[in-house]
Amino acid sequence: MFVSVQPQLLTDRAALEALVARLSRAPRIAFDTEGASFHRYTDRVYLIQMSSDAETGLVDPLAISDLAPVGELLADDRIEVVFHDADYDLRVLDRDYRFRARRIFDTRIAAQLLGEPAIGLAALLEKYRGVKIDKKLQRADWSQRPLPPDMIAYAAADTMHLLALRDELERKLAAAGRLAWAQEEFRQLEALRWAAPQTDFGYLRLKGAKAMPARARAVLRALHEWREEKARSLDRPPFKVLGNDALLALARREPRSPADLAAVPELPRSLAGRYGTELLAAITASPASVPEPPPGAFVGRPRPSPEVDRRIERLKELRNARARTLGLEPGVLCPNGTLEDIARAAPRGTAQLDAITDLREWQREALGQEAILVAAM
């Protein structure tokens, strides 16, 4: 039973050090973070939740500037750190604090490898622990202060029950002969690092932007830059300033007057009234064209040759059949990108298969190494 039935938000260094001292004596802890990317232009870690089998503590990074004790706890290889969907947490911890976790257990990955139909934390906690979490707070604004009691309770629940869920899933993995699969995936998580998004040509990531005529792309770039500056000044995410569909429609139509703006159905009337003058100014000031992105700015896979395509299809048939037998989603058993890497390499033996870095040992075992080699010929 948890000591912290109603966990309080820790707001001073002494309280943090005391919590970490207690947690460091535990063999494992549950860990989670909360951000506010749905509400803020610049996201950051706004809350840290940590639980042992005995207690749960919430740490306020806005009140405690030096979180070094948290980093030391994560890096202690005597302690297993349990996450649900560790990928994002590990990346933002690296981005904001350069913290790295060791000995990871991820309940989301465990659920995927068990073929669970619903792998969200709320669904798993209800199924395995009989705990119901109110989903209405999933997109709450964790940057607000003070945090109301219902948000504190919701955040605490994310880690308070996670260790018990971990134990349930580990037992099922062991019974299914898949614990080694999960452990291989967990080791991969230790290498995750934050990678800053490429921003200079961010407008070209909008769906359909690359196929636009040169003039429309120039307008789109100007509007995209305007939206970024407006979002930054308002401290709001860009999509809450103006949606992508509206940006693309404005770039294609290139309105020059308030009447033209009103004729763009994708632009809500309220936003046309609020930002119309600024939007028209950005369009008018946009150049006739913009430079093409430099080589490598958007690195994609080259189109497969017909022979590689045929190998990919054979590998997919193998993968899909094995996935049905194992009760796994095909993409969990082996992603399409890894299958394409195998098809391009066309391995003729173990050494060449070893060179495909994204292919896990457990995937080779589950698919059958000989079957992979035959399908890739």
Image: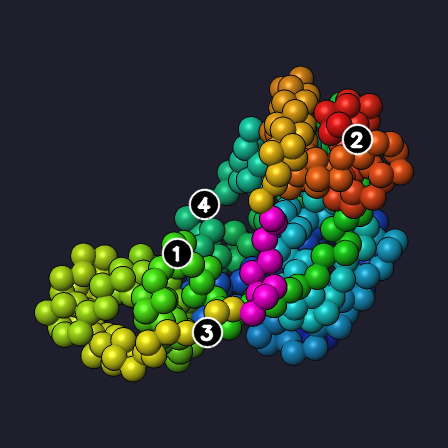
Say whether marks 4 and 2 touch (CB < 8 Å): no
Bounds of the magenta segment:
294-302
Q: Quadrant of the C terminus?
A: top right
Residue at image point 17% right, 67% down:
261
Label 4 vs label 1: CA separation?
39 Å
Residue at image point 82% right, 23% down:
370
Residue at image point 63% right, 22% down:
317
- Label 3 amino acid? Pro
Viewer-nearest residue: 113 or 155: 113
Extreme residue toward the front, this view? 306
Viewer-nearest residue: 229 or 119: 229
Label 1 vs label 2: CA separation?
39 Å
Say whether marks 4 and 1 touch (CB < 8 Å): no
For mark 2, what is the residue?
364
Query: Against 263, is 310 above or below?
Result: above
**x, y percent for residue 215:** 32, 69
Q: Secondary structure at mark 2?
A: helix
Mark with earlier residue (3, 4): 4
For mark 3, what is the residue?
291
Q: Secondary structure at mark 1?
A: helix
For mark 1, what is the residue?
211
Q: In which quarter of the view is residue 227 placed?
A: bottom left
Mark with earlier residue (4, 2): 4
Query: Against 271, is 172 above or below?
Result: above
Mark 3 vs mark 4, foreground winner is 3
For mark 4, what is the residue?
135
Mark with earlier residue (1, 2): 1
Q: Is residue 117 left or right of residue 28?
A: left
